[in-house]
Amino acid sequence: MRNMKMKEMFQKMKPGFMYSTVISNEGTSEIVFVIKDYNHKVKKMVNNPYANVRAGIEDNGTASGLLYLVQFGDYERNIYHSWFDKTIQLKQLIPLLNQKKVVHYFVNERNQIVDILAIPNSLNEIVHKYLQNVDPIWTIKEFDSLVYETMRKHKSKLGLWKYITKNMAS
């Protein structure tokens, strides 16, 4: 069953994106990330298994979101991101509180899994902080506005990376 759901997800994804999903692993739920890109890019990333992670909470006064970024190697085009909205993705966020590792599936444009990389979960603290904040309920449109404003403000995934890195240090 899990494989079918994953295969359907692969087919719906466009190259250059990262999505998250919850899978059942030995009776417990865990969140995994699927990165789909062109085979030549995927092969470069899996041949350089260095992964660097950033996460931050973004808020525009109406909605808040958790932004997760991961970079493979040190090439700026190998930065992928995923947003979480706790009002509709609570079941996806809760497993991140207890997972020891975060798994990334690398999928090529032919929807084939090229490799799987598990990295230590460094998201526990920021997910806890995001979930403990009491926020008003917002709409999907308001959350989408937050994502759009943030992306426009920082112009690129590299811009987001630099912004999150700067805020992590302060």
Image (tube, rainbow, N blue to C red):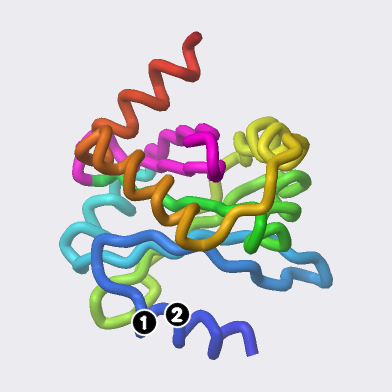
Q: Which residue is located at x 64 percent, y 63 percent? A: 88
Residue, disc 2:
9
Looking at the picture, how far across and down is residue 66, in whole percent? 54, 43
Magenta span: chief secondary structure: strand
Question: Is label 2 in contact with label 1 (beta carbons under 8 Å)?
Answer: yes
Categorize mark 2 by other alpha carbons within 10 Å: few (<14), some (14-19), many (20+).
some
In the picture, measured across the screen, residue 40 lies left or right of residue 14, that is left
Q: Which mark is residue 12?
A: 1
In the picture, measured across the screen, residue 139 lies left or right of residue 23, that is left
* Magenta-drawn stretch contains 74: yes
The three-letter code of the residue at mark 1 reads: Lys
Q: What is the spatial separation of the Cα atoms under label 2 and label 1, in whole angstroms? A: 5 Å
In the picture, measured across the screen, residue 131 lies left or right of residue 116, that is right
Locate residue 57: give its quadrant: top right
Categorize mark 1 by other alpha carbons within 10 Å: few (<14), some (14-19), many (20+).
few
Q: Is residue 26 visible?
A: yes
Residue that protrudes farthest toward the left in the picture: 40
Locate residue 9: give its quadrant: bottom left
Residue range highlighted in magenta: 50-77
